[in-house]
Amino acid sequence: MLSTSDLKTISLNCIPERGENITTHIFRPNQVIFYKGHFPYGIFILLKGEIKLEYSEKVSENVKECSILGINSFLNNTEYLYTVKTVSTCKVCFLSTNIYKDLLLKNHPIVTLIKS
């Protein structure tokens, strides 16, 4: 889980005007962010709100803000192990694979936070 100061760093860098092409999205309650079994095409960071990780019909876990979603699947290039569905209105920062690689080359602070 990220600290509050980490979250501030990410929030500041998720503003499109900064030129990093990192995008934020607002998801309404009960929307799916990604599905179990799909392959990742980027990293999602939950900035505000609450989501549910659905491992199966009977097994789920609620997660609140300051969380990186699907990072293990992304870094290992494996399919997602759970579906992510919003519980409340959520603000999510998205870094595509290409943007992540570009930020990695620049040693951007977001990459340092994600890897830690």
Image (tube, helix red, strand yellow):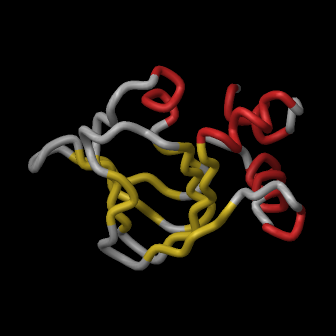
Query: Does residue 92 appear left or right of residue 5 in this picture?
Result: left
Q: Quadrant of residue 51?
A: bottom left
Instruction: Pick the quarter of the image with the C terminus.
Output: top right
Count of marks, rendered view: 0
Residue at the front extreme, as displayed: 98
Left or right of residue 28, residue 91 in this image:
right
Q: Position of residue 14 (x, y in %)?
A: 76, 60
Where residue 48 sits in the image (x, y, percent)?
A: 59, 66
Q: Quadrant of the N terminus?
A: top right
Residue at left offset 63%, top offset 59%? 93
| Residue positioned 36% across, 37% down in the render | 39
Side of 3 relative to 8 (left or right): left
Question: In the depicted view, which residue is nearer to us: 35 or 6?
Answer: 35
Residue at (10% x, 47% y) in the render: 58
Eyeballing the image, is 35 above or below 87?
above
Outermost residue toward the top in this view: 76
Q: 19 or 31: which is nearer to us?
A: 19
Q: Position of residue 82 (x, y in %)?
A: 28, 42
Q: Residue at x 54, y 75 (%)?
A: 26
On the image, the x and y values in percent for residue 18 come to: 89, 63
When the figure is inspected, residue 98 is found, relative to residue 32, above or below; the finding is above
**Location of residue 15 by image quarter:** bottom right
